């Protein structure tokens, strides 16, 4: 069964005709979204089941330019993290929830992913996951460039080029463009998967779901 987002129709005047585009799966998420972290093993299974299906990541903007600290959000976040851990089996460390200096702003992490995909598109999802692990499992500050440079080094990325791009107006604007695209497509929950093919856009999943179920939906729609 297809769950068509009718609002996507308005995008036809903005983008090249869908018929001219290859079939692909669009993943709307945020590296600092807890349910996206829980979804990390599932998106891997989906890729393994459909290795020829192009995956595009759109950084949807969970809390871009947020101003609250981890300590201020402690109770709210801990509840969600515990739920995600139970559902997904992903590892969480909770010490960072006491940090009164770490502002929960997801824009820097999203921007770092865009830098990585600019340098090497093939590592985009892996870099996305590396930021998730740094934040949730290792409690690194994912609003600081130093954290992203450490991750960049593990991917053999040139750190000077990474820093230059990270601070460039072009990458900052591209990060905003990803968030705006998610808004235009009425994506309100992360993670969300949308299939683009010759028929248009199909909402495959909204929120955390197991890969087995998503793979069946993809099978019905491909």
Image (cartoon, grey):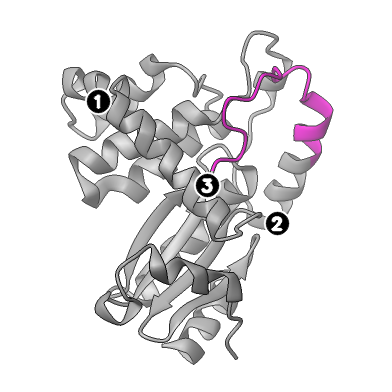
- Alpha-carbon span between mark 3 and mark 1: 20 Å
Residue 76 forms part of the magenta stretch: yes
Q: Nearer the viewer, residue 7 or 123?
A: 7
**Tag 1, which secondary structure?**
helix
Quadrant in the rendering for residue 188: bottom right
Residue at the top extreme, as displayed: 101
Image position of 168 with respect to 177: above or below: above
Q: Nearer the viewer, residue 138 or 20?
A: 20
Looking at the magenta stretch, what is its main secondary structure?
loop
Q: Position of residue 209 (x, y in %)?
A: 63, 66
For the question of whether residue 40 can be seen, the reply is: no
- Alpha-carbon span between mark 3 and mark 2: 23 Å
Residue at the (49%, 24%) spot, across then down = 142
Q: Which residues are magenta?
A: 61-79
**Tag 3, which secondary structure?**
loop
Residue at the (56%, 24%) spot, across then down = 139
Q: Position of residue 222 (x, y in %)?
A: 41, 88
State the mark number for residue 60.
3
Residue identified by numbered label 2: 87
Image position of 39 with respect to 117: above or below: below
State the mark number for residue 165.
1
């Amino acid at each position: 069964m297809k769950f068509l987002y009718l609002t996507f129709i308005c995008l036809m005047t903005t983008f090249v005709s869908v018929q001219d585009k290859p079939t692909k799966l669009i993943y709307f998420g945020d590296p600092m979204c807890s349910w996206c972290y829980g979804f990390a093993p599932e998106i891997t299974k989906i890729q393994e089941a459909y290795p020829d299906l192009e995956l595009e990541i759109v950084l949807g903007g969970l809390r871009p330019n947020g101003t609250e600290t981890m300590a201020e959000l402690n109770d709210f976040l801990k509840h969600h993290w515990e739920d995600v851990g139970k559902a997904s089996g992903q590892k969480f460390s909770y010490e960072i929830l006491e940090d009164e200096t770490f502002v929960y702003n997801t824009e820097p992490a999203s921007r770092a992913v865009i830098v990585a995909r600019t340098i090497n598109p093939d590592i985009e999802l892996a870099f996305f996951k590396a930021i998730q692990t740094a934040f949730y499992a290792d409690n690194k500050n994912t609003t600081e460039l130093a954290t992203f440079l450490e991750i960049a080094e593990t991917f053999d990325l040139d750190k000077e080029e990474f820093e230059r791009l990270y601070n460039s107006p072009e990458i900052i604007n591209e990060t905003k463009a990803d968030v705006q695209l998610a808004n235009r497509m009425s994506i309100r929950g992360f993670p969300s998967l949308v299939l683009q093919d010759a028929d248009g856009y199909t909402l495959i999943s909204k929120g955390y779901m197991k890969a087995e179920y998503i793979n069946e939906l993809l099978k019905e729609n491909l």
